[in-house]
Image (spheres, rainbow, N blue to C red):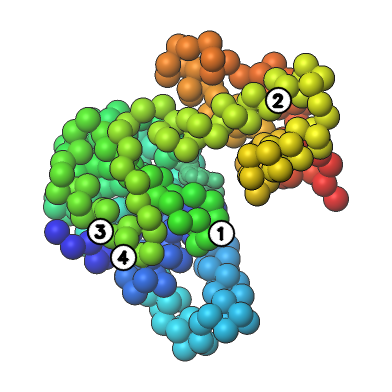
Amino acid sequence: MELKKIAVVGAGTMGNGISQVLSVAGLEVVMTDVAAAQLERATETISGSLERLIKKEKMTAAEKSAVMGRIRTSTDIGAIGDCDLVIEAATENLELKLKIFAQMDKIARKEAVIATNTSSISITRLAASTGRPDQVIGMHFFNPVAMMALVELIRGLQTSDATFAAVEALAKKVGKSPVQVRNSPGFVVNRMLCPMINEAIFALAEGLATAAQIDEAMKLGANHPIGPLALCDLIGLDVELAVMQVLYEGFKDPKYRPAPLLVDMVEAGYLGRKAKRGFFSYG
Ligand code: NAD
């Protein structure tokens, strides 16, 4: 099963990045979104990103126009009808995803694979909502998609070997390094990364060291390129809190309880870089 024609549902941060890497690899892409403005913004973002590649002499103007030419956009989800693979990258909300899964299941060819870029929703649960649970898989890209090498391929309980193999081949074709993961709260990366950040927040609240000292220690002592608190500011404190809640509720293990300071800061609106204030101040 070769996946040649791909649809991406949801053209936000992740959807436009995913569409870009697919098209750069030579695949035909149809990008859909309920909001026309999001599709316009996504097209501009991709164009700007390719323009930077031209400046760095990593792409020619002719290649850029070929990449842009392979991406169609539509506000009608009906446009996914002739695709081999549909990657859902819409807003992280269970009710919304269930609604989109019902639409995709109805519209996509019966042989088509349905993938989701969800960070926290159970693949098994989304698969079970369709009439093709063996053809559903998690395809968890990382932000920024064009830069990050990893794609976690998450197998729901029902995902078939054929589905996994086809999606794994596609991930490699677009230059990513796939890692196979079983369906479980947080998958692999968020399961390890978010508790580490949460622990840094506990340490800060205890007065173990200042935010700058904690980050400096982890950069120099663990060879991390960025400290845990600066990373949390980058991810967004609300996103960090949401992942900790998913881990806590999913495992019912107190080791995943969100740090009270994290909850407090989210309630204050100190969400990190996007709010210009988190553990550090910006601009
Ligand atoms: P985003 O808010 O930037 O984009 C979501 C898009 O979905 C918006 O353009 C919105 O208009 C669209 N949308 C909403 N309802 C829709 C519908 N019914 N049909 C089609 N499109 C619809 O969100 P994002 O950050 O790109 O996240 C998308 C998914 O990727 C989420 O599941 C998220 O958990 C996951 N994810 C995000 C990151 C990240 O760092 N942002 C990383 C990995 C995975």
Q: Residues within 10 Å of mark 2 (few under 14, many from 20)?
A: many
Marks 3 and 1, Cα distance to the nearest angstrom?
33 Å
Marks 2 and 4, Cα distance to the nearest angstrom?
39 Å
Q: Residues within 10 Å of mark 3 (few under 14, many from 20)?
A: some
| Labels 3, 1: front one | 3
Q: Kindly identify the amino acid type of the residue bearing the numbered disc 1.
A: Ala
Residue wearing tag 3: 169
Q: Kindly identify the amino acid type of the residue bearing the numbered disc 4.
A: Lys
- Residue at (47% x, 16% y) in the render: 249
Q: Is residue 228 above or below residue 89?
A: above
Residue wearing tag 2: 201
Which label sits on residue 173?
A: 4
Q: Position of residue 140 (x, y in %)?
A: 41, 45
Marks 1 and 4, Cα distance to the nearest angstrom?
30 Å
The answer to which image quadrant residue 5 occupies is bottom left
Left or right of residue 65, residue 53 in this image: right
Q: Residues within 10 Å of mark 4 (few under 14, many from 20)?
A: some
